[in-house]
Amino acid sequence: MTAPKPGTALFTSAQARAIDQRATAELGIPGFELMTRAAAAAFAMLQRRWPGARQLRVVCGAGNNGADGYLLARDALLDGLAVNLIALGEPKGADALQARDAFLAAGGHPGPFAGWPNLPPADVLVDAIYGTGLNRAPEGEARDAIEAMNAAGLPILALDMPSGLSADTGATPGAAVRATATATFIVHKRGLYTFHCEAAGAIERHALGLPESLLGSPDARLLVARHLPPRPRESNKGGNGHVLAIGGDHGTGGAVRMAAEAALRTGAGLVSVATRDENVLAMNAARPELMAHGIHGPQDLQPMLDKASVLALGPGLGQAGWGHALWTTALDAGLPTVLDADGLNLLHAEERSLPATVVLTPHPGEAGRLLGIDTRSVQADRFAAVREMARRFQAVVVLKGNGSLIASPAGEVAVCPWGNPGMASGGMGDTLTGIIAALLGQGCDAYDAACLGVGLHARAGDVAARNGERGLLAGDLLEPLRRLVNGVDA
């Protein structure tokens, strides 16, 4: 794996703490100095985003995140702003006590949460309760303070992490601050980019003057915007992959058509469709570039497999006798395969060996069935789930959802920072299957095809959602997809 750019590297909370410790041990930077830098960076960010803010309300926990809050409040006082600081408990640790004393020395006066209803109006709230230090549901006054901040209807700046959002998983076991923006320190944390990551709002990373060489190897990386290179002038359709999309049982012909058309729009040279007879006429009429064939069983499928270079297996396939027979025959062919939808459901019912080059694209429910756990457990730690699935099946795995994850059998994980709620509609997964299959056919290896395909799919969804998220259709992605895969401004 190529070393990721600093802005794309993702770390766990344990790694972040180790970096803090190395900064002290190797560079001689005291913890309080790092807190001072963090507070200054966050206050500067606050001033950029809300230049008219004159009244702050800062909510501080008892630990090091609270210390960052005390120091930001100190800086705001020294800059002439009015500050109301809510202290949730007595500071713990020498650095936190020193930060509180610095706030007092600047003329600050901490108050209890009980005084919240009587505080004067604020322009911006600052969340400095937990940061990266919590992986359970907030309780007591901390929970009440989080709920009060969310109910205030004011902009919220979170320090390092929104309190209640897991830095490692993006889960919210209980109440969580819904930040307008988050100032995260030194490194990006994994939980800022998946599951309930929308709680972070706009994210800015502040390196605090530490050299990138101090950071070490990240746990995962963010995808970056990419496209395929221009084709050689002498290109021909045979050199750009022949994708065979297999599926479309009774009543589900649209699923396999969407996968097949997405493969065409991503640049596959040829796309064939093996489907039910009833779907062929409609496909030929709507998209004559697809070579659709009515398939009654394995004997009809084999000649199509002999001509294909990549399979998109599963959209609308069904789990009855017809779908199962095609599934078995297709996997036995050993071709590079993208396995989705009923292809995954059949794998759950009948675990078997897979082709050497295979990409699995489950949503959390499908991933849970394949791992023998429930959906809630998958979502509780999406990174662990996608890595285990890639290891168990020796496949590249795309765990779909908010902040889709892509894992290789070697443990590499990439996270998609794009996409929107409008993509929660039928057919989106089918288009992703076709996109990845087309990239495999054009020479990408499985992990790169999955990473590039997930990124193109999500970015196309964002372009298509410019007219609104509700009512977004999978077919709306096809035109921006064509532009994005060619590097044309969408």
Image (spheres, rainbow, N blue to C red):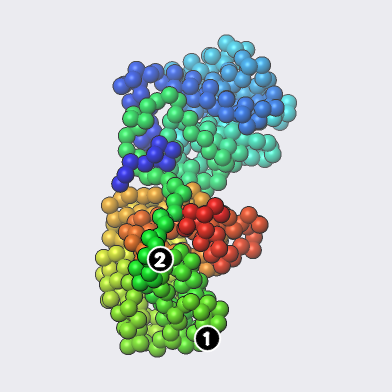
Q: Residue at x 54, y 64 (%)?
A: 478
Point out residue 247 in the picture as x, y percentages from the top left corner: 43, 78
For residue 420, above or below residue 324: above
Q: How many badges with numbers are in the image?
A: 2
**How far, Cα to Cα, is label 1 from label 2?**
24 Å
Asked if 373 appears above or below 163 in the picture, the reply is: below
Q: Which mark is residue 438?
A: 2
Identify the secondary structure beneath mark 2: helix
Which badge, 1 or 2, is on the more N-terminal residue? Answer: 1
Which is nearer the eye, 353 or 461? Answer: 461
Amino acid at the residue labelled 1:
Leu
Image side of residue 176 versus residue 295, left or right: right
Q: Position of residue 408 (x, y in %)?
A: 32, 54
Mark sitting on residue 281: 1
Q: Residue 350 appears in which quarter of the rendering?
A: bottom left
Task: Classify residue 386 by image quadrant.
Answer: bottom left
Q: Residue at x 46, y 43 (%)?
A: 191
Amino acid on which disc 2 is placed: Ala
Q: Give the residue drawn at x 29%, y 64%.
A: 357
In which quadrant will I find the C terminus?
bottom right
Q: Position of residue 385 (x, y in %)?
A: 37, 54
Residue 318 appears in the figure = no
Instruction: Tell whether label 2 touches label 1 (CB within 8 Å).
Output: no
